[in-house]
Amino acid sequence: MIVEHDNSLCCVNGSVRDENSNFLEGVKVSIGDVFTMTDENGRFAIKIPTEKRKEEQTITAYKESYAIFEDQVWPATKAEVKIILRKKQP
């Protein structure tokens, strides 16, 4: 019997906006030590290495002047992750 990965846990994608619904460019989005940056449309896609794939992952988003965002995601659902970053209070 040959066991092959089905890639259902491989990828997480979505978008990042501020509290006024503006897309944010240059946000660091990570799952563990795998990260990417959002593009000019606030979009991101993370490909999780085979050895780090699991049912539930913790996703983090960071941009200077904003509070750090952290939440759980389930890659197998293929649901788009919608992140809202809030400005840090002075």
Image (tube, rainbow, N blue to C red):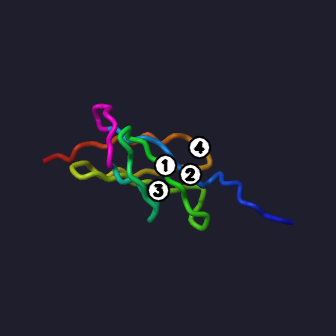
Which residue appears at 32% of the width and 41% of the height? 24
Residue at horizontal 61 percent and vertical 54 percent from the top = 9
Q: Disc 4 marks which residue?
A: 78
Q: Which residues are magenta?
A: 18-26
| Pair 3/1: label in front | 1
> Hey, what amino acid is under mark 1?
Ala
Which mark lies nearer to you, 2 or 3? Answer: 2
Q: Looking at the image, do the residues carrying marks 3 and 1 touch, with CB atoms under 8 Å apart?
A: no
| 25 in magenta | yes
Mark 3 Cα shell of 10 Å, populated few (<14), some (14-19), many (≥20) = few
Q: Quadrant of the N terminus?
A: bottom right
Counting residues from the start of the chain, the first of labels 4 and 2 encountered is 2
Q: Secondary structure at mark 1?
A: strand
Q: Earlier in the sequence, mark 3 or mark 1?
A: 1
Three-letter amino acid code of the residue under disc 4? Lys
Residue 72 in picture, x, y percent from top left: 48, 51
Q: Say which amino acid is labelled 3.
A: Thr
The residue located at (47%, 42%) in the rendering is: 14
Nearer the viewer's eye, disc 4 or disc 3?
A: 4
Single out the mark in the foreground, 1 or 4: 1
Q: Secondary structure at mark 2?
A: strand
Residue hosting label 2: 11
Could you tell me which residue is drawn at 62 percent across and 49 percent down? 76
Residue 53, x across and y down, in percent: 59, 61
Q: Are marks 2 and 1 in contact (CB under 8 Å)?
A: yes
Which residue is label 3 attached to? 58
| Lower position in the chain sequence, tag 4 or tag 3 | 3
Of the pair 71 and 51, the residue shown nearer to us:
51
Residue matched to label 1: 45
Whichever of callouts 2 and 3 sits on the residue coming sooner in the sequence is 2
Give the main secondary structure, helix, strand or loop, of the magenta stretch: loop
Q: CA distance from mark 1 to mark 4?
A: 11 Å
